[in-house]
Image (cartoon, rainbow, N blue to C red):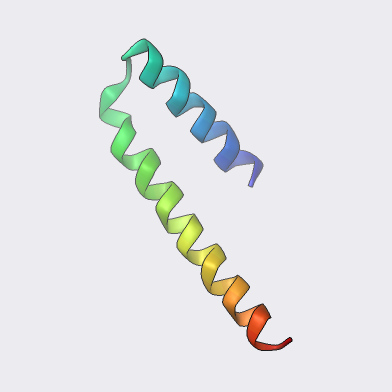
């Protein structure tokens, strides 16, 4: 999770400075993928409650 936070902070800084634009899609896709995984895990935990 710390890595994701660092990646998002880097994306924020790069976006504000309009640099490394080609890396934006990969960062966003990584975020989406990890959030989908987290949702799946939370749903599995909730089902056991």
Q: Quadrant of residue 3?
A: top right
Q: Determine whether, in the image, residue 31 is placed left or right of residue 5.
A: left
- The residue lying at 25 percent from left, 28 percent from top is 22
For the point 65% across and 41% down, which residue is it? 2
Residue extending farthest left: 22
Residue 10 vertical placement versus 38 (above, below): above
- Left or right for 21, reference 27: left
User: Residue 38 occupies which quadrant of the picture?
Assistant: bottom right
Give the residue drawn at x 46%, y 18%.
Answer: 13
Which residue is outermost to the right?
49
Single out the residue that lies furthest toward the bottom: 48
Q: Is residue 13 above or below residue 7?
A: above
| Quadrant including the C terminus | bottom right
Query: In the image, is residue 19 above or below residue 31?
Result: above
Number of numbered discs present? 0
Residue lying at 39% horizontally and 15% vertically, measured from the top left: 16
Q: Measuring from the top left, give residue 26's x and y in whole percent.
A: 33, 41
> Residue 23 in the image: x percent, y percent?
32, 31
Residue 19 position within the rendered picture, expressed as x and y whole percent measured from the top left: 32, 15
């Amino acid at each position: 999770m710390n890595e994701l936070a660092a990646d998002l902070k880097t994306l924020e800084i790069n976006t504000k400075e309009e640099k490394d634009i080609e890396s934006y899609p990969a960062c966003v896709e990584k975020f989406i993928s990890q959030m989908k995984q987290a949702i799946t895990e939370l749903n599995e935990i909730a089902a056991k409650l």
